[in-house]
Amino acid sequence: MSYKKYAYINTIGCQMNVYDSEKLAGILKSRGFEITDGMDKADIVVCNTCSIRHKAEEKAFSFLGRFAREKKKRPDLITVMAGCVAQQEGEKAFVRVPHLDIVLGTQAFSRFGQHLDALESGKKQIVDIGESHIIFEAMPDEAGFDENKISKFITIMQGCDNYCTYCVVPYVRGRERSRNHDAIVDEIKILAKNGIREITLLGQNVNSYGIKEEGISFPQLLKKVSEVEGIARIRFATSHPKDLSMELIHAIRDIDKVCKHLHLPVQSGSNKILKKMNRGYTRQTYIERIKALKKACPDIGLSTDIIVGFPSEDTKDFNDTMELLSEVGFDSIFAFAYSDRSSAPAAKFADQVDEKEKMSRLNQLLELQDIYTEKKNKALVGSKLEVLVEGESLKQRDGFLKTSDKMKQMTGRSASNKIVHFPSDTSAIGDLITIQIEEAYPHSLWGYPLGVEKNEK
Ligand code: 5AD
Ligand code: SF4
């Protein structure tokens, strides 16, 4: 019997890292590894890291630090630090994690196989933080495929040229570059053939897709992707407010498969802070774009990212951000306390805000948004939403189930990105089904499929 080899991959950070990890899994699978959930039986442990905030970076070091003792017991165990922290630290990573075997930077993923070979032939402590023109095209697609999902992320571009003053991305992921549109469409066709129904196109600023390469524009890419048979829904992230064009607004409106949801990070409601962040727009232009978007797509779901406690943010600036929440009417927000990143310019800015004050502002902001989120959800009671079924609901509520044994509580998402729970004995993962919304909570909606009789409690 041949000995089976196992790989454990820990992914920290954004959706792009999830995609990158799938590619690493593909390389490992093609070399005979089986991906495992059990760290203890792994022959290789990979941590795909994130350095966007201090906390994420610490998570990576503490995860990899845990393997020091295991490595002493099992010297053959391979440990790999991949991604943004790896890129940032390079050789220095060995100072904090001396047992590391490979440090794999953000542009080195396509060379992972080569480094594994080198390790096998006796090379030690490999560091690759070099550049690469290859953005995944040369990496296996089908091998990394996980059959149980209906929704997949797909990276369409890498890096960023915007240099927001708080952000490490331009330093750890390099200059912005877009993938070839044919390669993207081909990859999506493979996913569709394997039963994927929803895809999310990823980039730091998808609005500038293809511009440098003088290829097709992002709205044109959306159109091409919408022509792929089997794909029911298209999402994308992230859009930069300064580049949100009318062409894109119209594409969202006109292409049926494009979900009526936009994630548009505003970061702050204060013009003073936006300027210091180098965001390239004002509060007023942000609001104008939102207005144009709502005019074209009245049922659009909106989400955003906000940073509180950026250097020199005072009470007035913070209140401007609080007020923006009601002015725009976001469905949800992702809010963060500003985290100093030594490679980003804002680390040297004067008037850093006290940590306690940052946390207090963060809590105030989240509490206020909770009120708006619930309000927005409540406004949907009585409406009908088309939902893509994701599977059985983890949350079970007795009163909501019909009495039949076959009836299950299922869950899915609306195009506007709301989580919807409903009872059903017929719907399957990947179905599109219309739900009559009956109840609304801060983070979910509950309803009945059209045609299903309501359970009178
Ligand atoms: N501190 C806090 N939040 C940050 N983000 C990016 N850099 C930082 C930082 N240094 C947030 C931004 C971005 C999201 C992905 O992470 O809001 O949109
Ligand atoms: Fe970072 Fe700004 Fe680029 Fe987003 S647009 S990745 S926040 S530099």
Image (cartoon, rainbow, N blue to C red):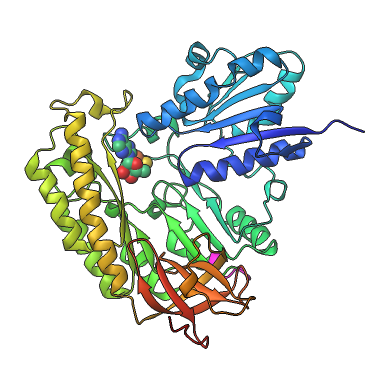
Is-magenta flag for residue 133? no
From the image, which quarter does the C terminus lie in?
bottom left
Provide the residue span drawn in magenta: 225-230
Tell me which residue sits at (32%, 27%) in the image. 341
Tell me which residue sits at (62%, 44%) in the image. 22
Q: Is residue 49 left or right of residue 38?
A: left
Can you see residue 8? yes
Q: Nearer the viewer, residue 266 or 432?
A: 432
Q: Nearer the viewer, residue 170 or 264?
A: 264
87 versus 314 height, above or below: above
Is-magenta flag for residue 226? yes
251 versus 77 height, above or below: below
Position in image of residue 130 (x %, y %): 54, 25
Tell me which residue sits at (67%, 29%) in the image. 40
148 versus 7 height, above or below: below
Q: Is residue 20 left or right of residue 297?
A: right
